[in-house]
Amino acid sequence: MKVTVFGTGYVGLVTGACLAEVGHSVMCVDVDESKIENLKNGQIPIYEPGLESIVKSNFSEGRLKFTTNAEEAVAFGTVQFIAVGTPPDEDGSADLRYVLKVAETIGQYLNHEAVVVTKSTVPVGTSDKVRAQLDSVFSTRDVSVPYHVASNPEFLKEGAAVSDFLKPDRIIVGTNSSFVESAMQELYAPFNRNHDRLMFMDVRSAELTKYAANAMLATKISFINEVANIAEYVGADIEQVRQGIGSDPRIGYQFIYPGCGYGGSCFPKDVKALVSTAKRVGYQPELLEAVESVNGRQKERLFDKVNNYFNGDLKGRTFAIWGLAFKPKTDDMREASSRVLMEALWQAGATVKAYDPEAMQETQRIYGSREDLQLMGTKEACLSNADALIICTEWKAFWAPDFEFIKSSLNEPLIVDGRNMYNPFRLEEMGLKYIGIGRSN
Ligand SMILES: NC(=O)C1=CN([C@@H]2O[C@H](COP(=O)(O)OP(=O)(O)OC[C@H]3O[C@@H](n4cnc5c(N)ncnc54)[C@H](O)[C@@H]3O)[C@@H](O)[C@H]2O)C=CC1
Ligand SMILES: O=C(O)[C@H]1O[C@H](OP(=O)(O)OP(=O)(O)OC[C@H]2O[C@@H](n3ccc(=O)[nH]c3=O)[C@H](O)[C@@H]2O)[C@H](O)[C@@H](O)[C@@H]1O
């Protein structure tokens, strides 16, 4: 099938590359000229395992094309995906300007029957707005083009985006049109061979499903973080509690890892957007508001722990930070907990020596050059002259470090572990002081 994808960010580029990988003909279009130029030259704008090789191979074999020419892109696809950003507005609601701009562009140039599919995460009712936008542009052109609108939210995770897309748990399609159903059946047939992953539903339910999924996962994380904080007060160990509850299949082990708060481009913004949607229709979403505020507080806990340990005397101290990205296997720093920590440390007059396997460039781009931030080439290089080691992201390379080296390098043998990577008792036996999240030591 011929597919056009608007937006070459995490979702657009992965969607385009994976659809090309299974044999479809895909044209990706973006307004960012340098991004498109780089993609044509084989330079991938983001770090995502497995993405570079499928982009390069499908591009060189001609199944994946990149352009900034919207007219050419609209003329191309039978399916037109909208995969542009939906950042939070000032009041937390999703800003739909980029989505509606794409709908306007499609309206300007579409002359053949096509399915316009919203893949961006958008509030309930957005498909109606996309349809209204298309109709309004068609009326100015005085043409009648048969088109269909559908919702097909994306559930991939950063760091596992390609494998999530190629092996989806489910493919949600919101539509009331049989044309769309058969187009989507054809498009997703390669992902649907042994198990029927496609779930058709009405458009509004599909739009809400996306927010409900992210809000549920965010709720699990805030729940375990809340219990972790209680564990600290009552002398329990959250890691034992986590395993104790995770073994109940009704609860499960996934998404109950305590930590220094959830980040990324989606949970924070999507919980806020669902709160905003609920309030707009007159419903008070108490649970969702609590999920958000528990998370905000959790992101401050690493700083609070360090500050308490040093009795508020942080001025002039240096801290080693391992892990800057909002989660492992990505270079994405959006809403990363490390940012809240670093900014609080700087505010208190401390210096940060930091290392991340992939997010160093992105950190540099965000914060520029400043005296109180030293980006180091290795995790070991952060440790000398540092008053403590603080873990923000659980990269694999941090799981089994040389603890003796850490102890001998730090001014103070203290590890503040925002992801509960280490065994407190073992570290204490080795003479290291350990502070985790919800640990009883
Ligand atoms: N990042 C993720 O892991 C996931 C994101 N989503 C949702 O997917 C949507 C996109 O997210 P990301 O890919 O992270 O965004 P992103 O910010 O990485 O990429 C968006 C891209 O759209 C381009 N763009 C903006 N206006 C355009 C236009 N008029 N025509 C063509 N391109 C245009 C931008 O230049 C940018 O390259 C959001 O709604 C997000 O909530 C859904 C699931 C996972
Ligand atoms: O809509 C989206 O953009 C995506 O949002 C999340 O994916 P993502 O944000 O990429 O990453 P996650 O693995 O969900 O992690 C999000 C945050 O939660 C934190 N987390 C996750 C799991 C856990 O048990 N504890 C925990 O603190 C992570 O450290 C990270 O900061 C969802 O998992 C995807 O299904 C969804 O498509």
Image (cartoon, rainbow, N blue to C red):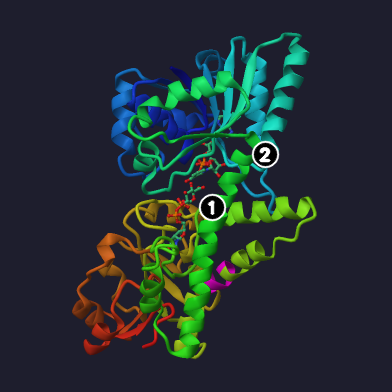
Whether residue 299 appears in magenta in the rendering, the answer is yes
Tag 2: residue type? Leu
Q: Is residue 188 left or right of residue 271?
A: left
Image disc number at residue 214: 1
* Residue 118 screen position, x and y as percent: 58, 32
Residue at the location (46% across, 24% down)? 185
Q: CA distance from mark 1 to mark 2?
A: 19 Å
At x 76%, y 55%, the residue is 279
> Which residue does the numbered mark 2 point to in the structure image?
96
Residue 160 image offset from top left, x and y in percent? 36, 47
Specify the principal SS of the magenta part: helix
Whether label 1 lies within 8 Å of ligand 2 gets the answer yes
Task: Look at 50% across and 62% down and name the residue there.
Answer: 262
- Specify the segment rendered in magenta: 295-300
Would residue 267 be counted in the magenta stretch? no
Mark 2 C-beta to ligand 1 under 8 Å: no
Viewer-proximal residue among 175 and 151: 175
Q: Is residue 312 above or below residue 359?
A: below
Circles 1 and 2 in contact, beta carbons < 8 Å: no
In the image shown, does 392 or 129 lie closer to the viewer?
Answer: 129
Task: Give the structural element (helix, strand or loop) at label 1.
Answer: helix
Of the two numbered discs 1 and 2 in the rendering, the one whose residue sits closer to the viewer: 1
In the rendered image, residue 384, in percent from the top left (x then y), is placed at 28, 76
Query: What amino acid type is highlighted by mark number 1?
Result: Asn
Q: Nearer the viewer, residue 382 or 125?
A: 125
Q: Quadrant of the N terminus?
A: top left
Check disc 2 and report its element: helix, strand or loop.
Answer: loop
